Amino acid sequence: MNTRRALAGRIALVTGAGRGIGRGIAERLARDGALVGVHYGHSERAALEVVAEIRKNGGRAFPVGAELGVPGDADAVFAAFDAGLREQTDTAADGAGSLDILVNNAGVSGSGPIGQAVPEVFDRMIAVNAKAPFFLVQGALPRMRDGGRVINISSLASRRAFPESVAYAMSKGALNTMTRCLAKELAGRGITVNTVGPGFIETDMNARRTATPEARADLAARSAFDRIGMPSDVADVVAFLASDDSRWITGQYLDASGGTAL
Ligand code: NAP
């Protein structure tokens, strides 16, 4: 029996991994054997809990703190990542070979319909959801080993009309476009670039939509399975894309909405 774990020996960075979907992804990648940089912006305590939980379960992880959506954000992430990695491994942390998997998960939502839009909120959506991932990939590439993985967490909102949060949907559309462009460019190095598009998932992002039993039932009914998605529903798809089994898939948007878009 082959007991080797799918991501043994790999190094991953998951943004926004202190809570929600990112936490689920970090825990799953660690379970599959990766050493995981658990990035957080504001939720330091939560991220430290995730690191502790991973270690308790026999995995390897370290915290990476840096706010996204501010000038110099990608540089700050990699400064923290390099420093954290140096404590974990003998790898030349600021050089080639110090990263295999980048998951751009951190995101902000709630931009509202166009009638309520203000420039500051629009700019924030773009800065956190599109610009930060773009420069995180730029920072990741010199570090990434050939055969690496870039996985972007987009949203079904980018594929269906979602006027209730139009700037958010636009920012995720930018991520889908980046995925296609970079997949073409990076294939020569065996690096795949893919997007996962969740539907409604049980996280803080949907706290308002799950506040009452009626609202919860309404949200659940959007999925063909009549339930709200869990972070693990997305994390398991990410784990597949992070693994060697997905080597022939690149430039794709994988719908992980439980059939919401059918
Ligand atoms: P969440 O529970 O609200 O968590 C958001 C995560 O993003 C947190 O870990 C947060 O970290 C991080 N983040 C937000 N702003 C940041 C900033 N300025 N700097 C650094 N980190 C920041 O959301 P979620 O539901 O897990 O969402 C994760 C991803 O899935 C997002 O990209 C979201 O758009 C996407 N998505 C979610 C759903 C859904 O239904 N939940 C559906 C489709 C797509 P800190 O707390 O440490 O700042």
Image (cartoon, grey):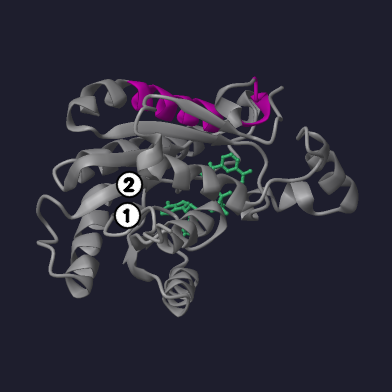
Q: Which residue is mark 1?
A: 12
Q: Which residues are magenta?
A: 161-180
| Quadrant of residue 116 within the rendered picture | top right
Label 2 neighbour load within 10 Å: few <14, some 14-19, many 20+: many
Left or right side of 4 for 82: left
- Measuring 19% from the left and 62% from the top, which residue is drawn there? 82
Q: Which of the marked residues, 2 or 1, is nearer the chain's N terminus?
A: 1
Task: Determine crowd level at label 1: few under 14, some 14-19, many 20+ residues with C-alpha closer than 10 A.
Answer: many
Location of residue 197 in the rendering, given as x and y in whole percent from the top left corner: 54, 34
Q: Secondary structure at mark 1?
A: strand
Residue 137 seen by the camera = yes
Give the percent coordinates (x, y) of residue 164.
Answer: 67, 29
Q: CA distance from mark 2 to mark 1?
A: 6 Å
| Residue labelled with disc 2 | 102
The reply to whether dot 2 and dot 1 touch (C-beta < 8 Å) is yes
Residue at horizontal 90 percent and vertical 47 percent from the top = 214
Say whether residue 82 is magenta. Answer: no
